[in-house]
Image (cartoon, rainbow, N blue to C red):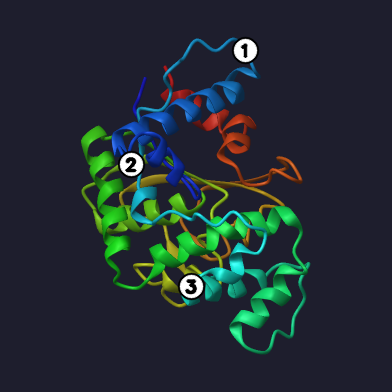
Amino acid sequence: MDKIVGVHGIGKYHYYRDAGNSVSGAAAAVRDKWDRYLHKGLTGGGPYAKERYITEVAYYAHLLGENKDDSPRAVQRMDTGAQEVFVAWAKQLDSVGEGLTGALHRVTGWLLDRLQGNAAEFARFFCPEVAAYMTAGGKVRAEARAAVAEVIRRNRPKVVIAHSLGSVVAYETLWAHPDLEVDLLITLGSPLGMRNVIFERLLPAPVNGWGARPRQVRRWINIADKDDIAAIPPGLRACFTGVDQEALVNLDWLDFHTVEKYLGCGALNDHLKPYLG
């Protein structure tokens, strides 16, 4: 079996806390769940005997900080950077319309009143973590990329599976470290193409409106739920060169972004089976 490394998405700080502030403990707990979710996708829900599919999950959530506000209006109490991400992201949703004006805090409340509960809950994690990571030249960004690079370098995997914000971290990490050769990059629910939030702020910056597959990645597969409000747009071929294949899936209208649904949906099976021995 070839080695497979995962790069997790948003909302994973609690694994670090639950493991007694241990990065290795958090990474092991996330990997255990990824193995279980992927087993369901590969077997259709067959008996699970703790099969190992994922060699290691690169863990970086502890670097982004913990969101302790569980209230429905948590977004309104975010710092300015996170609120700016929230407004830029929410303006892209069909449900909230156009014509946003006024002070940032008031606009945030206006948007919250127009979002469904699941979208507001998603924003509570997505916006602060994106803001923490995307700060240009920031320490957090550099440390997160270093953490992912260390795991890939140590394992030398054939496959990297990156979910959600993890696809952004993985993309930038692979560009920043040309010694990290990967046969297959699979991005799940990726916000890489999200305008005014992520795309224009990527490192390296897009050239003439185009990003590109990292040079040492042989193939890139992108998979997104058609209704995933993190994957805007769900397809990346319109803004990135080198995306070899894309798949739109229909996971769950309420659970549209979790790695459990993505790994368990079966869309990865044909791409992974050559590496599973």
Give the SS element for disc 1.
Answer: loop
Taking the spot 65% from the left edge, 55% from the top edge, the residue there is 121
Nearer mark to the viewer, of 3 and 1: 3
Disc 1 packing (10 Å; few <14; some 14–19; many ≥20): few
Q: Give the vertical position of 101 relative to 113 (above or below).
A: below
Give the label on residue 79, or none.
3
Q: Is residue 27 above or below residue 132?
A: above
Left or right: 134, with 42 as reference point: left
Q: Which mark is residue 182?
A: 2
Q: Earlier in the sequence, mark 3 or mark 1?
A: 1
Q: Indicate left or right for 157 with 52 as reference.
A: left
Residue that numbered label 1 is attached to? 46
In x, y percent, where is residue 16? 38, 40
Instruction: Tell me how far mark 2 sits from mark 3, CA to CA.
Output: 37 Å
Q: Residue at x 27, y 61 (%)?
A: 142
Cβ–Cβ under 8 Å for marks 1 and 2: no
**Residue extending furthest bottom?**
102
Pick the quarter of the image with the N terminus.
top left
Residue 196 visible in image: no
Query: Image quadrant of residue 72?
Result: bottom right
User: To which quarter of the image does residue 140 belong?
Assistant: bottom left
